Amino acid sequence: EDGYALWMRYVPVEPALAATYRAQLSDIVAPDATPTQRAARAELERGLAGLLGTAPPMHAEATQQYAVVLGTPASSPLLAPLHSEIASLGPEGYLLKRVQRDGRSVLVVAGQRDIGVLYGVFHLLRLLQTGASLDALDVHESPRVHLRVLDHWDNLDGHVERGYAGRSLWDWQSLPEWKDPRYTDYARANASLGINGTVLNNVNASAWSLAPAYLDKAAALAEVFRPYGIRLYLSARFSAPIELGGLKTADPLDPGVQRWWRDKVNEIYARIPDFGGFLVKANSEGQPGPQDYGRSHADGANLLADALAPHGGVVMWRAFVYAHDVPADRATQAFTEFAGLDGAFRPNVIVQVKNGPIDFQPREPFHGLFGAMPRTPLMMEFQLTKEYLGFNTHLVYLGPLFEEVLRSDTHARGKGSTVAKLVDGSLEGHTLTGMAGVANIGNDRTWTGSHFDQANWYAFGRLAWNPHQSARDIAADWAAMTFSPDPTVVQPIVAMMMASREAAVNYMTPLGLHHLMARGHHYGPGPWVDGGPRPDWTSVYYHRADRNGIGFDRNASGSNAVAQYAPELAAQYGDLTKVPEPLLLWFHHVPWNHRMASGRTLWDELVTRYSLGVKQVQEMQRQWSTLTDPPEVERGSAPLPSPIDPQRSAQITAFLRIQRREAQWWRDASIAYFQSINDLPLPAGEAPPPHPLAYYKSLQFPSAPGDGR
Ligand code: BDP
């Protein structure tokens, strides 16, 4: 097992259960007239062959003894009686249901369209993989969010920005002639989660992605993805009319520029009739944009939106911006630039907002724009590639991070106005809704650079389908499918996963600290980072530690970022006695001797947290070892075989060792640094860092993957 199969391993289920399933799935009616129908049928065949030993017979037409029916009311006359029930599920929904037909019980997997049926097949396979009963099925599913998109930060030269899983999947050189079968497996994996869009190229985009030769290549990929319900999007470089078109300007109000984009969009749709649209990073980190011409983000977004509108395409316009002139507080920048543009965007523009106001940190409060732009559809952007969370070697399950953000209450329309309700459109009645995940995928055999990072792709997809789901339940499904449905396997793996994000927060940036990673590549501790081109690319800008205290004052006395939240929240965040401790140093500059809920001083608490993070990783190692080295049942008896295959086990064990060592590195380096500033003794029982600060500062991460553009 090298991890290539992801959560679609389809290994044999336990014999008694297999017998039951075989009886229930004995004969299948499944249409095979369209590519999507064939994909659904092929997946079911493949899944059942693996899970049950043999795939049952499949027929395009009803047989005497059929036990399962796949299809749409249009593709299968057997489903006509369920017509209105199916129609209520919408274009991507499905039902899995037991019905009585000709005196026997039949399992129906149906949707209004073929894609719903494919999603239903994956759901059915998930039930089998997790050992669920098929006796009384009555599942009705439709996605809560329309655009469920992976953003690839892939460059045309094959390098993946912030990618820790090898090189880009897209082999631009051999496309469009050669369509690597891996593209199909990529599409299967996404469809298994309901992901229905992919942005092929980096937001720091090359204009060349829009050149005819690359559009031909993109069109070949779109062809592979289409049967799996995945639409293709491209990141557009705002200055492309200059670079590709030879125009003198990219000013959004210039008629020549408008014509150029209209023509370009027509050219794209001629090749890719279901093209999804553009993702744009503009006037951020050196990227060109409308502000170069004194125009607003709305002017820029609307330019592209007008070109796309006749074809049904959308613009995903990113709100991750910060000014050339370093702001007093970078956390306030996007809000300052965007909140006032509420209502100024075309209906086919969705503003894509990172989950927090800085940048994909282990913990941030939710972004203040959520709830502040009621007239504008806002799309969530999460980062799956763990740029600030230990890359691919640290086991950090991001489900709890996503869940924490989605469940945050913005109070935008009173209590209960969660971010999830903004993202699914229900709070403001938007129909254009979306969630994006910055992909952690590359050409590594594991896809994601580690076995556990597959769970972050998985959890993203499941939450994009329904942002109200529980991270724990999702972890349990993933663990069962990826390793074994045996509860004695699932239980420790879920425990490890659920504790892992808080562990990383503790050993990296506890109590609301943020952006203390090493300069540039962001791997490992660098709380001492200062100087350089921009203060907001340093750590000292964010932690503001001095002899007296630590933390960023974002109250009225400081940057007043709290004012970018609803009054109830501003009052809570702004009050030292009410702010949740996990966000304490995000919002407050606090004296080292401040009394914490535990009764400890802030300094003692900070040190305790760092140490706790290390202990939590040790505990993850211990839990893992119960699976890899099962205890002897009785004295003298042979040890039980490990339920985990040796290949994956070896990598996971090694990576946990790396994580344990580096958690310690984070703790020791951070304590050495902060102690050099406050000169305070460590709390009793806490081991001093074994090296002086200079040693930690001198450590160089040998080669930071994903660094360099
Ligand atoms: C930052 C990354 C940078 C990205 C940027 C973005 O360090 O590589 O280009 O986000 O999201 O976190 O645009």
Image: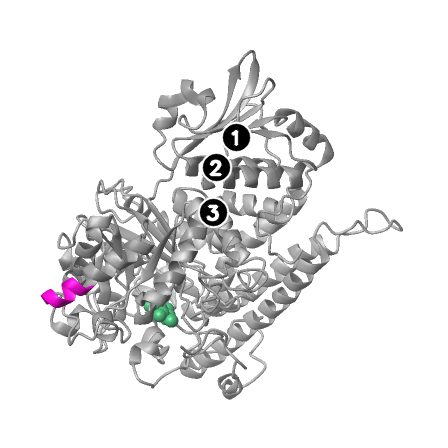
According to the image, label 1 marks what residue?
A: 30
Q: Nearer the viewer, residue 95 or 402?
A: 95
Quadrant in which the C terminus appears: bottom left
Q: Is mark 1 within 8 Å of ligand 1?
A: no
Question: The disc labelled 2 sits on which kind of residue?
Answer: Gln
572 sits left or right of 344 in the view: right
Q: Residue at x 53, y 87 (%)?
A: 695
Q: Which segment did they paint magenta?
A: 253-260
Q: Residue at x 53, y 61 (%)?
A: 448
x 33%, y 55%: residue = 271
In the rendered image, residue 544, in percent from the top left (x then y), is placed at 33, 76
x, y percent for residue 296: 14, 65
Q: Are discs 1 and 3 less than 8 Å apart at CB?
A: no
The residue carrying mark 3 is 471
The residue at 65%/45% (across/down) is 484
Q: Nearer the viewer, residue 457 or 502?
A: 457
Ligand 1 has an atom within 8 Å of the beta carbon of the residue at disc 2 = no
Percent from the top left, x then y, of residue 333?
22, 67
Which marked residue is nearer to the observer: mark 2 or mark 3?
2
**Which residue is the site of mark 2?**
37
